[in-house]
Image (cartoon, rainbow, N blue to C red):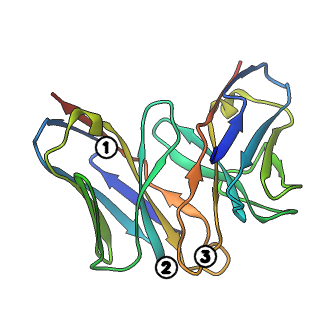
Amino acid sequence: NAGVTQTPKFRVLKTGQSMTLLCAQDMNHEYMYWYRQDPGMGLRLIHYSVGEGTTAKGEVPDGYNVSRLKKQNFLLGLESAAPSQTSVYFCASSYRGARSTEAFFGQGTRLTVV
Amino acid sequence: EDQVTQSPEALRLQEGESSSLNCSYTVSGLRGLFWYRQDPGKGPEFLFTLYSAGEEKEKERLKATLTKKESFLHITAPKPEDSATYLCAVQALNRGSNYKLTFGKGTLLTVNP
């Protein structure tokens, strides 16, 4: 199984440009998440989705939008990139269970905004 | 607000020198506590889930324990390949957010041969 796949792996953007990060999971998970990881800040939740067609804001949602048109895909968009959005972005997914279930992470997208 | 604090921030050990990493947490009600390992340039890799105080889980040289306020990741006779950043995360019982993880900043473990 591929698990959670993120594309692209690296990207350099100029300030004001837009882009979309794609996350795909093949585990039939209901929940999907986008995190960003910055030095000294840890992993912070940007947006999440509890099912196809539903999305919600996380801890740091400003400047980002998301969509989940298909259960297996979760897209993260930056409409007008800013240097403060330079970070490593991780997508994760988990299944809905009676007990707490672990999240599986992708390999990350390293984004630099210049 | 859920909070997770990990200590120390960095730990350097000699091969075979056992030690423990700490994860202190504040959450209204704990649904689960997770330990992940993260290698440079990679995504976090799941290690353990702990659900209630007194629970313990083991995997090779790692053992995770849980109390009502903190969790420990014990590393017995570590090897250089155990070098990584270890992340702790909690999931709360809050009805509106019981599927979200709150992460600590991690402990960078270096094991020298």
Q: CA distance from mark 3 to mark 1?
A: 32 Å
Residue type, label 3: Gly
Which numbered tag is attached to residue B9?
1
Q: CA distance from mark 1 to mark 2?
A: 25 Å
The image shows residue B32 at horizontal and vertical percentages of: 46, 72
Q: Residue at x 71, y 52 (%)?
A: A26
Which numbered tag is attached to residue B28?
2
Q: Are marks 3 and 1 on the same chain?
A: no
Q: CA distance from mark 2 to mark 3?
A: 20 Å
Which numbered tag is attached to residue A77?
none
The image shows residue A18 at horizontal and vertical percentages of: 86, 30
- State left or right for residue B10 relative to residue B39: left
Q: Chain of mark 3?
A: A
**Crowd tier of the residue under label 1, counting other residues whose Cα lies within 10 Å: few below 14, some 14–19, many 20 or above:** some
Frontmost of labels 3 and 1 is: 3
Q: Are marks 1 and 2 on the same chain?
A: yes
Residue type, label 1: Glu
Camera-side residue of A76 and B42: B42
Q: Report which residue position mark 3 lands on.
A: A97
Residue type, label 2: Ser
Q: Residue at x 81, y 59 (%)?
A: A71
The image shows residue A34 at horizontal and vertical percentages of: 68, 49
Mark 1 or 2, nearer chain start: 1
Residue B27 shows up from this direction: no
Q: Chain of mark 1?
A: B
* Circles 2 and 3: CB atoms closer than 8 Å: no
